[in-house]
Image (spheres, grey):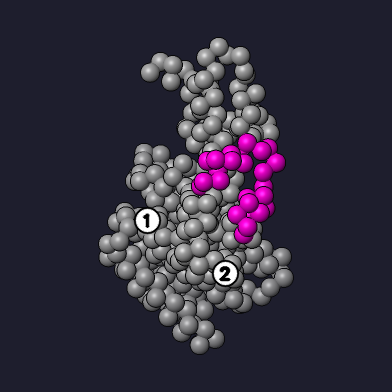
Amino acid sequence: MNWIILLFLFFAFLGVVLSLLFFLKHKGNRFSNTVLGVYTLLFAFELLNNCLRWSGDIQKIPFVHLNLAHFPLWTAYGALVFIYVRNIIDQSRFKRYDMLFLLPPMITIGMLWPFYRLSTQDKLMAVEEGKIFEIAIFPGYTIWIVIAIMFFYGFLTYLTFWKKKRIGFRENVWLKWFVGSYLGFVFAFALYIFLVRFQLMDPSYDYLVDLAITAFIAMLAFFGFVQPDVFEGKSIHEVLPFIKYRKTGLSPALSLEMKEKLLQTMQSEKPYLNHELRLDDVAKTLNLSRNQTSQIINEHFNLSFFDFVNQYRIKEAKNLLLQNTERNRTIDHIAYDVGFNNRASFYKAFRKFTNNTPTNYIKHMEAS
């Protein structure tokens, strides 16, 4: 077990170094770097806490005071992830309602306070006699509430920001991987609790779970470092080397040539008016493979295929809405005319590209 402790002490040390790098990092947003630095530092502290527990030193002076010290952190990680992503996407810092994020950690501290407030000798006695949870108020079901909160923060972060107008294809890929890394950490943590609670795994093997958690935290830190490059325009496969278009055979020169051909095709032939238009159809027009066509759209326009097509449809719809002065065509008819199959998808796309509804758009344009 000694080599395992040394390994995780090394990871904890790396976490501290990494957090310092975030604190001192000038590229990107200083506030977001600081938030991610705090996140990484708290995780390094939790790793250190686990190392002390594995070695038995946490039952001795002076480390006995670190017993249960990492419990409140579990509900703080997700809040930091949410605040970090919000700052990246919306450039907003702390808001008044962010104080609500403090409630779960503060409630946890309050429940554990009877143990925290003990003197050193009383803590030593409680630890030696295994009476920690007879003193601290932390019922068995509480950990499931904690896990639910952790998952909630992850899904809340992604669902809140993936529809933002600034989120293009490459930023959306980054967001999925970033939040996915956090959710991977939560899943590994939840899996360990489940296996131990139902006696499917010996608690002494928790270092295997911590190894998985460490990997997810390392991924999270990596995505924090590359975030400025993603949001400043670098293609996703340049920034994330494991995300590549495999063997497309598309040279930079040919890619640019096909980009221009695609633009010309969209403007002159208007294939987007076809309700059944698919990526394969566009690829056939360009005489390229499906993957090559997807690469051109993603890299040069920072859009998914459907967003690329829908932006043309919405532009066409805006013109038709303004020309429809006598209201001889309904909005549903116009939606169908520009290539949408139903009203819901048209309204969703219209709001995404104009931040408005078709009706309000008409009123605004008529008033101006």
**Residue in view at x 37 percent, y 59 percent:** 228
Q: Quadrant of residue 201?
A: bottom right
Identity, as a three-letter code, of the amino acid under mark 1 = Glu
**Residue in view at x 72 percent, y 70 percent:** 200
- In space, the residues marked 1 and 2 are separated at their CA atoms by 26 Å
Quarter of the image with the C terminus is top left
**Residue in view at x 44 percent, y 77 percent:** 11
Mark 2 lies on a secondary structure that is loop
**Residue in view at x 46 percent, y 41 percent:** 165
Specify whether 283 is left or right of 296: right
Q: Of residues 361 and 61, which is closer to you in this image?
A: 361
Q: Which residue is mark 2?
A: 249
Q: Which residue is mark 1?
A: 232
| Residue 203 image offset from top left, x and y in percent | 62, 73
Residue 122 visible in rendering = no
Q: Of residues 102 and 348, which is closer to you in this image?
A: 348
Residue extent of the magenta highlight: 263-288
Specify whether 41 is left or right of 142: left
